[in-house]
Amino acid sequence: MLKLTRPLAFFDLETTGTNVVKDRIIEIYILKISPDNSYEDYHKIINPGVKIPSEATAIHGITNEDVMDKPAFADISHRLENFLANCDLAGYNSNKFDIPMLIEEFLRCGIDFDITKRRLIDVQNIFHKMEPRTLKAAYRFYCGKELHDAHEAKADTRATYEILISQIEKYKDTEYIYNDGSVSKPVKNDMDALYKFSYNQKNVDLAGHIGINRKGVEVFNFGKYKGKSVKEVFRKEPQYYDWMMKADFPLSTKTVIKKIKLKAAADDSGFIIKKD
């Protein structure tokens, strides 16, 4: 049982995206634990007042049709404020995302949701601090040894080799459940399998600026066109391509967008390519 001096509200949001300024909440669930460890919950689907991108729907399953007859955040804001009155707040990655998003929505309604006297408990931060994702921590976890010469190239490389051997042994019969519900045992002594499992195949470039959506289309992972087709953006705003080629992006990223533009030109005779 949790030792509480006042209610602790665990909560999670589903949203139209990850931009705190531009995106909106479309679902909120709260589990409020009282000092006597009794609990009550609060759940609402919310009409965000903006279109829900297909990329967001693919993650949480909520469509524009699902929210058509639902209340706006402003309609529930005062009741929600009262429900959270005198509560500390807890969540997973909540300090970086959920709490800022919630505060932003309250402020749009003219409600100053004060967090200065609330205790904010982020379970993800506890996880990352107690289980650090450093090479030294991985060597201790998988190999049961201390890496005394950390950050020395030879020691780090040999430790990485030993860690992979240990991972293959530790997880050889372990099932992994993917987002689509499929299950496999991907960590095995097979380099093709290890490559497919360890490489982020959602990114086209190594820096992760260009991704692949569910339809197999190259999209931007950053900026004002996040989630938008690279090909379509370059077609409608060719100066954006020029800006990227001149800006401080990795050469590998510039090579990728150049290939995308050249391929688009081959597919679309009306797509004019500017020679660099």
Image (cartoon, helix red, strand yellow):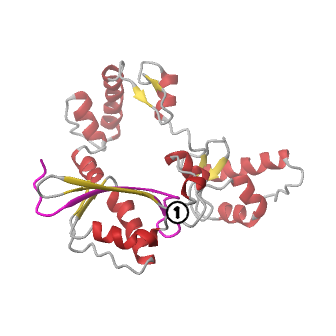
- Residue located beneath label 1 in the image: 47
Residue 209 visible in the snapshot = no
Please give the range of residues in magenta. Answer: 1-26
| Of residues 37 and 254, the one drawn nearer to the viewer in this rendering | 37
Amino acid found under the numbered disc labelled 1: Asn
- Give above or below for 101 relative to 45: below
- Give above or below for 33 relative to 163: below
Main secondary structure type of the part rendered in magenta: loop
Q: Residue at x 78, y 59 (%)?
A: 235
| Of residues 61 and 160, the one drawn nearer to the viewer in this rendering | 61
Q: Residue at x 32, y 52 (%)?
A: 92
Q: Residue at x 51, y 61 (%)?
A: 70
- Left or right of 186? Residue 31 is left
Decide whether residue 6 is among the magenta residues: yes
- The percent coordinates of residue 74 (x first, y second) are 45, 73
- Left or right of 252? Residue 105 is left
- Give above or below for 109 relative to 266: below
Q: Residue at x 61, y 61 (%)?
A: 51
| Of residues 17 and 113, the one drawn nearer to the viewer in this rendering | 113
- Left or right of 149? Residue 160 is right
Quarter where residue 100 is shown: bottom left
Residue 118 visible in the snapshot = yes
Seen from this angle, which residue lies furthest bottom?
110
Q: Secondary structure at mark 1?
A: loop
- The percent coordinates of residue 191 (x first, y second) are 49, 22
- Left or right of 19? Residue 230 is right
